[in-house]
Image (cartoon, rainbow, N blue to C red):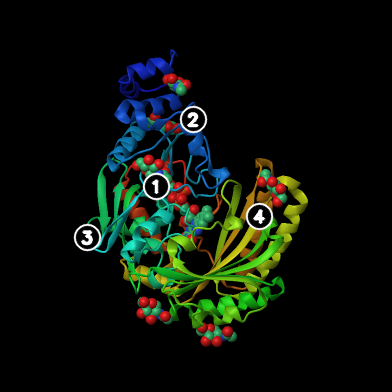
């Protein structure tokens, strides 16, 4: 039991009936009951879910990763920015730790929810509205990209968003957002013209090029370190033909023997990606038992609906194609199907790395992937049904240029790309059943990541940049954004959160690395 100072207990006592119902001790309520009780007392009662409620249990099923679905003291589900303001004021006054869940696609424990605290779940703040006059789409943080694309397509427009329809808004947009439109528009956060955000003192403010521009820049990549975003206003992208809001996607499976050639094709594609900014690609080696074991898959897209644009010729000639599927469809349809290597409802371990576009590192990463799969097969239980991905994506230097042109951000890509370099973004993923299997797999995944990192450093092509939305629990992405972006992020945090609420009470997500002055 924790002793509470009189003002806190006094505030809690307002909820006399709730207090009587749940607390019968002489030394004051335990922090869980105190914090959840205070939320109820502040008028949010019908938005609070306690562990004994069936909705609480069903909310735990809304996390993409089982590893992330922690059971908090209670969950609170706001409907409006005013609710969010009351929530943050109440949690701060009660010294209550909290987690922040947007669409719930974080991969690891403490990426979004907390155990010792209150999870703020944005699920009920979802939906998209479009203003054709301003060409701005307003998107709430708790929805999914599927819904966004479906809502916008009839208007002949879209936005830069997730490439899997289930991915959430809040985390994706505050952490960057790599998309089909990255080469043409920058990271998704670069298309945000205004954030409505609740800061630590509970004020609801706007951040854009005119109002609070330092906060606008810091929210573009700063994750939940500055406030809770309650609405994102994005500049839309118009389709060439409004009546045909379609994009092209092609999904290929290569013979594994052609892996090296496919990698060479990606390096060449990456170096030329700024010349055709409408075309994008993702390639991965994966261990997918349901697909018969190890596979090499390639996804190609063109945001203007052009089939087989010249930029993909290198890929199409890279080797023996085992299967192919080409579609010209609305974005909502292209992102609907689930990648079997990224299935929801299992435990996950992610690591991410970046380096200059260099085929040697990619080939090494792929060969260490094969070794990691062999180790995992030997040590995990047969019913673990584990899947892996060794996924490569081009990071064209065009991405950083769009960011700068749109007012700047704290992503840090402009720092790593300042010599005009383009890079490769590597994501190492494991999906597995069972906590024991997850614990056994962790050191294997870490070793794989460390081997690739060490090799890239040895060749002098390593970037220290870690993409926040792909980073694993022990990675420190905000330490990798370079001195200018980090300075902007720290200055904005000091100004808008002087007491460090989002550094101390926030228990989930990535923090700002401590500096000499902290
Ligand atoms: C299947 C799958 C596909 C993916 N595809 C892509 C892709 O194409 N491109 C890409 O870049 N990434 C992709 N990702 C990664 C994705 O961007 C991250 O998982 C991202 O965090 C998801 O956002 P979310 O709202 O669902 O996350 P959550 O887990 O809910 O939140 C993650 C973090 O964001 C913060 N946050 C959430 N909401 C808010 C808010 N309202 N205000 C302030 N902070 C908030 C939270 O504190 C938390 O730290 C994918 C992930 C998965 C699982
Ligand atoms: C859940 O627990 C709270 C507090 O202990 C109690 O007031 C409430 O009646 C319980 N609800 C159910 C459905 O059991
Ligand atoms: C707030 O809680 C933390 C730990 O949960 C504790 O260390 C700190 O002293 C508390 N602060 C106040 C003002 O009670
Ligand atoms: C969206 O929010 C509404 C309430 O605002 C809620 O009823 C609905 O279930 C939410 N949708 C999802 C998919 O969570
Ligand atoms: C990309 O799309 C834009 C807008 O439709 C178009 O002007 C441009 O020519 C396209 N680029 C290529 C290489 O097709
Ligand atoms: C590299 O890409 C460019 C631009 O798409 C293309 O013209 C060239 O043929 C490619 N080179 C190889 C070896 O595929
Ligand atoms: C694991 O995979 C096997 C074979 O594909 C399948 O029969 C089984 O149902 C799967 N187990 C779980 C828990 O999904």
* Left or right, residue 215 beside residue 468: left
- Note whether residue 505 is visible: no
Residues tagged 3 and 2 counted as in contact (Cβ below 8 A): no
Marks 1,2: beta carbons within 8 A: no
Q: Is residue 301 left or right of residue 496?
A: right
Distance from Cα at disc 1 to Cα at disc 4: 28 Å
Residue that numbered label 4 is attached to:
387
Q: Please give the name of the residue rendered at 53% of the width and 58% of the height, measured from the top-left corner.
A: 337
Compared to 38, does 221 lie above or below? Answer: below
Q: Residue at x 32, y 42 (%)?
A: 200
* Residue, disc 2: 54
The residue at which mark 1 appears reads as: 142
Instruction: Look at discs 3 and 1 and give the one toward the viewer.
Output: 1
Q: Nearer the viewer, mark 4 or mark 2?
A: 2
Q: Residues within 10 Å of mark 3 (few under 14, many from 20)?
A: few
Give the mark, 4 or 3, whose residue is nearer the N terminus.
3
Q: Which dot marks residue 210?
A: 3
Residue appearing at x 60%, y 51% in the figure:
349
State how far apart marks 1 and 2 are (Cα).
Answer: 20 Å
């Amino acid at each position: 039991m924790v002793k509470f100072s009189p003002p806190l207990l006094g505030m809690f006592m307002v909820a006399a009936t709730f207090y009587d119902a749940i607390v019968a001790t002489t030394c004051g309520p335990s922090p869980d009951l105190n914090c959840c009780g205070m939320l109820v007392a502040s008028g949010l009662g019908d938005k609070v879910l306690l562990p004994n409620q069936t909705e609480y249990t069903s909310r735990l099923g809304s996390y993409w990763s089982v590893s992330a679905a922690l059971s908090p003291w209670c969950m609170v589900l706001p409907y409006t920015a005013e609710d969010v303001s009351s929530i943050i004021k109440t949690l701060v006054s009660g010294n209550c730790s909290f987690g922040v869940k947007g669409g719930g696609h974080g991969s690891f424990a403490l990426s979004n929810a907390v155990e010792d605290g209150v999870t703020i779940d944005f699920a009920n703040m979802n939906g998209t509205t479009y203003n054709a006059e301003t060409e701005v789409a307003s998107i709430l943080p708790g929805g999914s990209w599927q819904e966004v694309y479906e809502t916008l397509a009839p208007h002949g427009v879209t936005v830069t968003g997730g490439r899997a329809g289930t991915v959430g808004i809040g985390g994706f947009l505050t952490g960057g957002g790599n998309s089909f439109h990255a080469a043409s528009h920058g990271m998704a956060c670069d298309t945000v013209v205004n954030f409505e955000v609740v800061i630590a003192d509970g004020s609801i403010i706007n951040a854009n090029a005119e109002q609070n521009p330092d906060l606008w820049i810091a929210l573009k990549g700063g994750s939940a370190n500055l406030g809770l975003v309650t609405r994102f206003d994005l500049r839309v992208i118009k389709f060439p033909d409004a009546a045909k809001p379609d994009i092209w996607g092609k999904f290929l499976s290569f013979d594994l023997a052609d892996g090296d050639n496919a990698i060479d094709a990606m390096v060449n594609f990456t170096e030329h990606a700024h010349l055709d900014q409408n075309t994008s690609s993702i390639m991965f080696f994966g261990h997918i038992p349901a697909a018969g074991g190890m596979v090499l898959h390639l996804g190609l897209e063109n945001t203007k609906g052009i089939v087989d644009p010249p930029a993909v010729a290198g890929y199409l000639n890279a080797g023996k194609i085992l299967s192919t599927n080409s579609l010209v469809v609305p974005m909502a349809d292209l992102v609907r199907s689930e990648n079997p290597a990224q299935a929801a409802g299992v435990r996950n371990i992610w690591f991410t790395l970046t380096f200059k576009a260099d085929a040697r590192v990619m080939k090494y990463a792929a060969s260490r992937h094969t070794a990691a799969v062999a180790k995992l097969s030997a040590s995990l239980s047969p019913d673990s049904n584990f899947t892996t991905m060794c996924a490569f994506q081009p990071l064209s230097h065009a991405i950083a240029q769009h960011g700068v042109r749109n007012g700047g951000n704290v992503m840090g890509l402009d720092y790593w790309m300042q010599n005009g370099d383009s890079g490769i973004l590597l994501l190492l993923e494991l999906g597995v059943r069972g906590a024991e299997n997850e614990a056994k797999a962790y050191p294997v995944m870490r070793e794989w990541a460390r081997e690739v990192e060490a090799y890239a450093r040895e060749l002098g092509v390593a970037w220290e940049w870690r993409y926040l939305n792909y980073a694993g629990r022990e990675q420190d992405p905000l330490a990798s954004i370079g001195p200018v972006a980090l300075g902007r992020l720290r200055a904005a945090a000091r100004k808008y959160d002087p007491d460090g609420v989002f550094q101390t009470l926030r228990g989930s997500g990535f923090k700002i690395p401590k500096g000499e002055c902290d």
